[in-house]
Amino acid sequence: MKDFAALFAHIDESTKTTVKIAALADYFGTAPLDDRLWTIALFTGRRPKRTITATRLREWAAEVANLPDWLFAESYSIVGDLAETIALVLPPPTQTTEIPLSHWINYIKYLSTLDDAARKTGILQAWDSLPTTQRFLFTKLLTGGFRIGVSAKLITRALAQSTGQPEPRLAHKLMGNWTPDTATWDSLIVADDPTADLSRPYPFYLAYQLDSLDDLGQPDDWNAERKWDGIRGQLIIRGGEQHLWSRGEDLMTDRFPELARLRDDLPDGTVIDGEILAYKDEKPLSFNALQKRIGRKTVPGKLLVDAPAILMAYDILEHDGQDIRALPFTDRRKLLKTLTDQSPEGAPLRLSASLAFANWDDLRNARAQSRAVGAEGLMLKRRKSPYLAGRKRGDWWKWKIDPLTIDAVLIYAQAGHGRRANLFTDYTFAVRDGENFVPFTKAYSGLTDAEFREITAWVRKNTLQRFGPVRQVPPVHVFEIAFEGLQPSPRHKSGVALRFPRMLRWRRDKPVHEANTLADLQEMLATFG
Amino acid sequence: MISALRRGSPGRTHRALRDPAADHAIITAMTDILTFTDRGIYCPAGDFYIDPWRPVDRALITHAHSDHARPGMGSYLATDGTAPVMKHRLGNIRVDTVTYGSETQIGDARVSFHPAGHVPGSAQIRVEVKGQVWVVSGDYKTVADGLSTPFAPVKCHAFITECTFGLPVFSWTPQAILTGQINDWWAANAAAGRTSILGTYALGKAQRLLRLLNPDIGPILTHAAIENTNEVIRNQGVTLPQTIRVTAETNAKNHPGALVLATPSAVDSTWARRFGPASTAFASGWMALRGVRRRRAADRGFIVSDHADWDGLNMAIKATGATKIFATHGYTATFRRWLCEQGYDAHVGSTDYQGEGFDNPKEIEE
C-alpha cells in the first residue's frame, strides 16, 4: 500500500502529464504483479464491490475521532469527500503495517463475509495502522467511487512505456469486462491476443468539435452524416453471442432486449459502432424517450412499446472475424452497407445515411435542419480515414448545432465536491415572472475558476438565507445558460426541464430586468420542445 | 438569539444584510468590557478600538497583517515588534509602542499585549476593567515556529478568538517533518534541473520558511514584496539566510537549483515564467484539503499555517480559563456550536477579518 500511496501522491500532486506517466511506468515495472493489475483496474473504473455503507463508515469514524455527528457532517461538507474527511479527522495511527495493495483488497473482501461488529473491528484496526494518504486510499476502496484524475489514455501510455507494446494494442487489451479476479497481469497485458475474450470491445474513436470548415480542404474528401442524439454503442456478435457496450464501457446488453435478435440478423464475427436510438415510424424519438431506459437493468413492457430501440450503424470495426479498423472509411462503409441491406425485414438496425452535398454551403444548410430531423448536428469523416482509438484530431469532426440559450438570474448557490469543495459552484437559476423569480434549472459548469472564486466570495457576503447547504442570494447576477433542448416537466415549478444546461457566460453587462421571462421560456418550449 | 446567529454566514456577513437581532443580542450580552461595532471591537471604558476596519481616533493593533492593521486611524498602539512592518506598510502614521507584558492605563481600562505566536510582534490584547479581564486573540498559533515569540495563554473571563481553521479536519504537520518535506522537494528539483517556486504570504510565513530552508541546496530568490518585508524584519535583529531579490534583470540561468519564494498570486503569473522549467508549491493550511490543493494546480502543497489548527484552538481556549468565548473569523457558526456543546458560553462576533484566505487573490496577498 505504501508504494501505491506514493504513486497516488505523485500522480495526484503533479500537474504535469510527463511526471504522471513516468511515475506510473516506474510502478508498472517494479510493483508486485497483482498490485499492478489492481492499479490498472482501479484507474479504469473497476473497483471492488462496496461492502460497507457510507453511513456506517461515518458513524465509526466520528466515534473514533470523538466528534458529534453534526460536526463530522459539517466537516464532510467542507472537505467534499467522505474518505478524505475520515482520513483527516481520525487520530494518528498507533501501529504500522507493510501490507501491499492487493492484500488490502482481499482484506476488504474478507470483511464483507463478517458480521457488522467484526467488520467494524477490522476497519478500525486498518485505520489505526495506516498514515493519512494510505488511510484515505483504503477508505476510498471501501466507499467505491475511486476517481482520481488518471485517464485511460494516461494508463495506456505508461503501460506502453513500461512494456514496449504499442498504445492502441494496449488500449484494446484494457477494454471489456475483465476484472482482477478473472485476469492476471500475464493474461491481460503480456499475452498477445486481445480478442481472446469474446466480449471485448474496441476503443471508441471520438471526434473533436469542428472549428472551421476552411481547414478541411476538398468537400469530395469527406463523408457527412447526421450526428444522432442517442447513446453511442458498440455491438459485438462473436461466438454466437451478442454484447452491447456503451462508450463508458458499460455493458448494456440486457437493457436493450429488442437488439438481442441482431445475433441472428448479422453474421458471426461482426462489430458495429453506432448510436442507440428510440425509434418509431422510421423517425428517432427525442432523447427524453431514451432517457427513461437509461439506468434500468430490466425494461418494462410498456417502454418497449413506447420507445423501441434500434442501432443506427455508423461504422464496422470487425468483419468476418477480422479487425478491419485499418481499412479506409469508404471501404468499411461498403461492407457495412452490404450488411445492413442484407439484414432481414424488421431487424432493429439502420444505416446512418450519408448526406449528399456538392459544396460546403449544402452542408451548412443540412446542418441548419438538424433539429427538425431530430439530430444534434453533423459528423464529418475523411473518406480514407482508418478507425482510430480515442479522441483524435484531423480525420473525424463533429459539427454540432449551436445550443439554445436563455438569460437567467442566479438565486441559490451550493458548494461543490472534490476539486470544487469549499467553492460555491452549483447554482439554481430563475426566469422572471412579473416581480417573482421562478427557478427552472440548475447548472454547474462553464465558468472559469477565477469566476467561481469571485462568485464564492460574493455568496459568502450576500447570503440571505441558508437551507442546509443551500444559500439563497439576492437576484442580481445574470448568466447566459446554454442547453441542448427542453421538454415539459410537471416536476419542475417552471413546467420545463432542460437538457444538458450549462453556463455559457456571466452577463455582467445585463441588469436583472433584462433577463428572460417565464413567458420567453414557454415560447421556447412551444417552438423547440 | 441562537437561531439568528446560526443564519449568519461564517464571519463574512455583509453588514447591510446582517440580521439586526443578532447584533443586538451580542451587544446586550457583553455590555461591560468590549463590544462588536461596525468599526471594530470597541472598549467603552478606554474609548479605543482593537483592530478596527474603519477609521477611528485610537486603534490598538494585534499585528501588521492588512486585515488587522488598516490605514486612516488617528493613532496606533502596537508592540515594538509590530510597529516597524506596520509603518512600512501604512506609511507615515502615529504609532506608540509597548513591549510584551507591560501595562498601560487607557481611561478606565488597563491594557497589555501578550505573545500570539502568529508572526513576529503579533499580540493578544488583554483588557482589564474593574477586575473583569477580556482578551482579544488577533490571529494566533500555539506551536513555536522558530521565528515569532511563542504563544502564551492569558487567563481571562472572556476570550475573543479567531477560528480560521476551526474544523477537526485541520491538523498541522510538525515543523521538523515539514522542514524535511520542503528541503527534499527543493533538492529533488535542483537535481533534476528545475527551479522550485514556493508560494507563501509575505509577512510571517515567508520568514518562517526562510529559516527552515537549507541554504546548502542552492540559492534562495525572493519576490520583491517578500524581500521588502525581509528587510524590515532583518532590521529588527532577526537572522534570515541570504536571499537574492528578483528584479526585471534576474536571469534564471545564473541561479541553477534555486528556490524562489513568491507571493501566492505570483506563482501562476507571467512573473514566474522567467524561471523556466519549474516545480510549483504552496505553503498554506488549506493545502490539507485535496480539493483546494488540486484547484490551485500546484505540483506540491505543504501544510503549514500561522493560525492554530483544531487542537491548537481547543487547547488555547481551555488554557485561558475563560467561560465566555466569541468566535470571530473562520468557521464561526460551526465552532460556536462546538464550544457550546463543550459547556462554554460561546458566541459569534462579526468582524471584517479574513484570516488565511486562499480563493480570493486579494486575501492571499496578505
Image: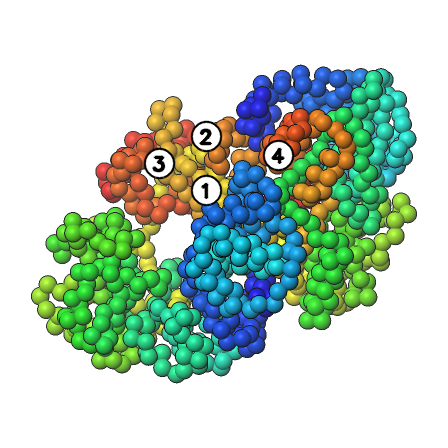
Color scheme of the displayed model: rainbow
What whole-number distance in Å separates the C-alpha atoms at marks 1 and 2? 16 Å
Residue identified by numbered label 1: A426
Q: Are marks 1 and 2 in contact (CB under 8 Å)?
A: no
The amino acid at mark 4 is: Trp
The amino acid at mark 1 is: Asp
Question: Label for residue A164?
Answer: none
Query: Where residue A80 appears, x then y in whole percent?
Result: 52, 47
Residue in view at x 40 percent, y 31 percent: A514
Query: Where residue B140 appears, x then y in whole percent?
Result: 75, 39
The amino acid at mark 3 is: Phe
Give the chain letter at badge 1: A
Query: Where residue B152 appears, x then y in whole percent?
Result: 82, 38
Residue A66, compared with residue A391, is above or below; it is above
Q: Please check whether the numbered discs 4 and 3 fall on a single chain.
A: no
Question: Label for residue B338?
Answer: 4
